[in-house]
Image (cartoon, helix red, strand yellow):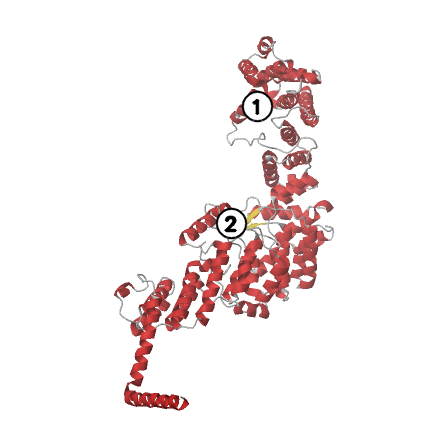
Amino acid sequence: MSTPERRHRLALAVAFCLPVLSAQACGPEFPLSLLDDRAQSLAELPEGNFAFEVARLGKPVPGIGQSGDATLAPYWDGSSEQYVQQRDEIEQKELGDALYQQVKRLRSLTDARQVEDQGLDLPAELRLYTAGAVAFGQADYVLASDYFRRVLELPPEQRRLRSTWAAYSLGRAQAGLSRPEGVPAEETQRSEEDQRLFVQEAARAATEAFRQTRQLVAQGYADPLELGIASLGEEALLAHQAGDWATAIRLYASQSAHQSTTGYSSLRQLSGELARLPDEQLVPLLALAQVQQLLTAQLLSRIGWYNDQRPNDEQHLADLLLDNAGADLANADRLAALSYQYGRYDNAARFLDKAGDSGLAWWLRAKLALRDGDATRAAEAYAKAARAFPAEEDWGYRRTANWDYETVKPRCRVNGENAILSLQRGDYLDAFDLLLRSDDIYWWDAATVAERVLTLEELKGYVDAKVPAAKPQTEAERERYQPRPPAARLRDLLARRLLREGQYAEALPYFDSDALRDAARRYGQARIDGESRWTSAGRAEALYQAAVIAREQGMELLGYEMSPDFQSLGGAFALRQVGPQEAGGLLSADEAKRQNASLAQPNSRYHYRWVAAALAGRAADQLPHSSQAFAAVLCKASGWLLYRDLTGARAYYRRYVEEGPYVPWAANFGQDCEAPDFDAAARRVREERGQWLRTRLRPYKYLLAGALTLGIAIWLLRRRRVA
């Protein structure tokens, strides 16, 4: 980007793209940097992801697919309007307008038998199912069940559209009969034992109907409403009502494994119900693996926490769970993680003895090794953890205590923590490589190491060996501010570093666009010409050209990816500036020395403004003090610092006042500056040199004239002798 307008647009784009998930946050939010607080990064275990954890509790049912748009989330007010609308849209699409209008008219009736009588010209499955739906709407679950069974008794070729609907609706009707308010009046006249048996039979029939729904879907019967997935939740509800927590959790987890938000929210509700049970009721349930694992998932995920503050009852629940966990080997790594999060480190070690070789187990072993002061064993455990975690495992988004955000991909996080240990022992390229593997997640940390810790030769060698040029962005991608891959950003970072350190030709191939390469080429050539042109005015003009490029395109060509310029954010935000480092803690003396050697000069936001001003000052050194160009370049230098460094801006102004000529626009020095006239300055140089020479030679004019006359006479005499 070459103009302030484009940089402003970039700043807005960055701000809009950053996650905004809390009404409490003011302004843009920024990613977690592991290197900001290295001890904290190594000590903490990020919270887990509830959806990911509960997916381990149940498996998808083969043949029923994943949920899509048809799996609707229920309205907060319990309204069924969205389901009715969805059903009507599907029926109209399936049946065509004529049949749909007929079915719609029959649905408006209140007597199921009238539906059957008036729908004789409809296909049998539509007539019987619609009659059952009307009976269900009148809460006549016995009659509704009869109609739904009649649909399922039709020959398979006559019920391709409504088999799954009928089985699912039969399950719901029987579930209605299993509840006290749904027991028919005639059954209430019977004994309590008979009523109990009736309710049990209805619940059993409902369960069988929901299972049949899934079987029919797997056999290929139409399921546009995704009732196979919904049947899992309905069956789970029956199990929950019967006090069968293990089955309810397993079925809801299976529903969640089909990407159903209903399964996920139901498990959250169950975990809340379990957490609220009195201890005497909860402790016996902890013997059930499903209950133990669900509560572990809740606690690991920190559901219900606010501002990273743990509710008091969460501590009690964790203690209760850990003290009564038994020997569940399948969940040992999660129990170890829970122990670690709640500060029970001895407990964590005992569970890890049973935890096997999962990625989480090795991650925790690394953290416990660090607590014991064994960095070597920790690094080995981190390496094993990275290999054990699947690359695609993703725990999702989290918010840290200071409101930074992080997408927790365990393998990337483990590599990032291991990079801290690599930095401590001086293996800087390994640390950089580990951080770079995270792609975008820890890019800020990788960029910090690239700019502040690696030498230029180390960084260039790494890029040349491992980071080929990425495909250039199209103009459309640039206009939409599409993020570039880390490879392209790293090569640009290297290019800017090379340009800052005076390796102008070497920098060009690493820039990501032709426009930047051209600007960098012009800047480099101007810097070279500023040293090599024959005339002082020519050198001044070249230095001023370099100054203008540095000021106008400094962020893109010279800006630091991180502090102090934050080119990674387009320079739009003033984040914490990093100053000189002192060794201590996890920061070694050698790394501190490297970081201090690579500090920006000056170490101020938009440091390239000072670079530009200094180049303009050097241009002034080459110009006659009486020239307009001398005043103009000092005016520009002052203006570039005016709102950043008032002392520096005043220094250029004082130099003009003390050494420069009167110019009419000096009243607004630094703001209203004319373009420097270098041609006039060159003429002024020639004039001043001629005047200087005449002034110096005037006392010797007669002597010089006599010497000249004598010289001419001698020359003429020699010519005559030769002739």
Q: Is residue 602 above or below residue 397?
A: below
Q: Earlier in the sequence, mark 2 or mark 1?
A: 1
Which element type, helix, strand or loop, lies under badge 2?
A: loop
Q: Is residue 84 visible to the viewer in this orientation of the structure?
A: yes
Q: Amino acid at mark 1?
A: Ile
Q: Residue at x 32, y 78 (%)?
A: 690
Q: Position of residue 503 (x, y in %)?
A: 53, 66
**Which x, y percent locates residue 419?**
62, 60
Question: Nearest the camera: 666 or 310?
Answer: 666
Q: Residues within 10 Å of mark 1 (few under 14, many from 20)?
A: some
Res 168 quadrant in image: top right
- The residue wearing badge 1 is 90
In the rendered structure, the answer to whether residue 237 lies left or right of residue 354 reads: left
Q: Quadrant of residue 448?
A: bottom right
Q: Are marks 2 and 1 in contact (CB under 8 Å)?
A: no
**Amino acid type of the residue that numbered disc 2 sits on in the rendered structure:** Asn
Q: Nearer the viewer, residue 105 or 457?
A: 457
| Residue at the (65%, 40%) spot, across then down | 55
Is residue 521 found left or right of 383 in the rendered image?
A: left
Distance (Cα) linking label 2 and label 1: 44 Å
Q: 450 or 661, which lies in front?
A: 661
Position of 468 relative to 217 (above/below)? below
Q: Which mark is residue 307?
A: 2
Quadrant the C terminus occupies: bottom left
What is the x, y in percent for residue 237?
63, 30
Rendered image: mark on residue 353: none
Judged from the image, the secondary structure of the residue bearing numbered disc 1 is helix
Give the number of callouts: 2
Q: Is residue 177 left or right of residue 13?
A: right
Q: Residue at x 34, y 67 (%)?
A: 679
